[in-house]
Amino acid sequence: MGATDTREHIVEAADRLFYENGYAATSFADIAAAVGLSRGNFYYHFKTKDELLGAVIARRLASTEAMLAAWEEGASSPVARIRRFIDILVMNRAKIIAYGCPVGTLCEELAKLDHAAQDDAAAIFGAYRGWLAGEFAALGRAADADSLALHVLMRSQGIATLATAFHDEAIIHREVAALTAWLAAEVGEASRPTPTAPQRPS
Amino acid sequence: MGATDTREHIVEAADRLFYENGYAATSFADIAAAVGLSRGNFYYHFKTKDELLGAVIARRLASTEAMLAAWEEGASSPVARIRRFIDILVMNRAKIIAYGCPVGTLCEELAKLDHAAQDDAAAIFGAYRGWLAGEFAALGRAADADSLALHVLMRSQGIATLATAFHDEAIIHREVAALTAWLAAEVGEASRPTPTAPQRPS
DNA sequence: AGCCCTCTAGGTCAAGCGTCCTACGAAGCT
DNA sequence: AGCTTCGTAGGACGCTTGACCTAGAGGGCT
């Protein structure tokens, strides 16, 4: 039972399929097969594909904000928190090489489709942007906090795009190290418990 | 007359529509309407959509290589040539904000579709990569020429992605200025006839 | 029990896709 | 002139899409 559960399963599966195959290339039938539901039943939960997309974007935005809030409690310093953001690229490298950045690729696809929800998707970037800017402001860089935040975000996107295009993991390790070095030079080096230097996986 | 002309017109229109609307979202009917041909007649020129994609990629690769070769003749120094590459972002800013980078968005879309031609599309990136590496090598940085080339390419992609997502032209101007400054610091400043500092358009 | 509301299954519908065929006109060659 | 070749026009096919309806199963309520 529980329509809420079923709806959540649908959004979860749609989230994954939209990421792996793209929004336009994912059909209701694909999602239904992934969840194990009948095709026609989608009308009860989601009237249109756009409505489903809105739910997926809302889910991603909520989980992003939750993750950032958790980092706020967990990590020791603003610099360490920013590094934690950068390290996402390394942790998710396998998926990034195969499918790119979930946020960036969705925004670009929606921009091409001139979709009404493209600004909602960009709001996920906005969450990262605001959070990063807050961390830079906490480091005494309030004046150019937004520029610094966009710079980190920009390099993350560039790394993801090239890693996807060339299917090359070394690009991620090398450029993450360069970005971490830039951060240290920009705001000063604090204590560094976890290394982000390029380390090849087994 | 001239099937070659017609074929060229088709590839030209497909190139533009693939860029503006994406590969999957562009139908034969769309291209036929743009060229002014009947839909069914595509079978004579291109048997499948994949074949058309191959022709579009080949056309982009050829025009890219031609442009790079022309730069080799035109610009004065390797640094000036690299700056010329960076300035593409400013020159094409309107289209980039609307549709993103032609190469990057195509590569990401094909990666999601797991398309057979994704490596061919990445070869366009490869052309830029090799050309940039050659310029850095000419500047005495042969040892890390490829890394430097990838870094420039990476930042170009990041700038394009964020500018598209936020529909913000200021990001392009600010980050192009930052990238130009990085280049000057990295390989030393040469004579600089044309400024790349952020300058707002009218 | 009886009822109602929630949720699901299966299936129809028009429209769109890529694919593919056949017939017509315009040249160029013998 | 007759014939072949090239290029175009228009439409038919089989399939999948998203959208949508109807019938009925299941659980909680009075």
Image (cartoon, coloured by chain):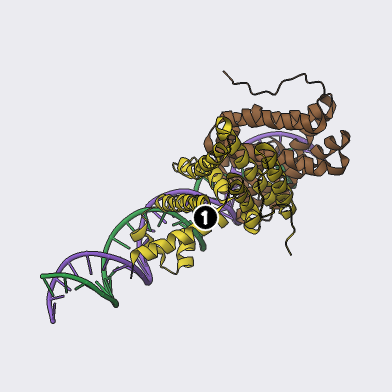
Chain colours: A brown, B yellow, C green, D purple
Q: How many callouts does the rendering have?
A: 1
Secondary element at image label 1:
helix
Three-letter amino acid code of the residue under disc 1? Phe
Q: Is residue B92 left or right of residue A192?
A: left
Quadrant of residue B186 within the rendered picture: top right
- Across and down, in percent, residue B62 comes to 45, 51
Q: Is residue B99 left or right of residue B63?
A: right
| In-front residue for pair A176/A54 | A176
| In-front residue for pair A54/C25 | C25
Q: Is residue A20 left or right of residue B39?
A: right
- Across and down, in percent, residue D7 comes to 33, 67
For mark 1, name the chain: B
Q: Is residue A112 above or below residue D8?
A: above
| In-front residue for pair C3/A125 | A125
User: Residue beneath label 1, please?
Assistant: B18
| In-front residue for pair A20/B157 | B157
Neighbour class for label 1 at 10 Å: few (<14), some, many (≥20)?
many
The structure residue drawn at horizontal position 76% and vertical position 44%, both measured from the top left corner, is: A126
- Across and down, in percent, residue A2 comes to 71, 36
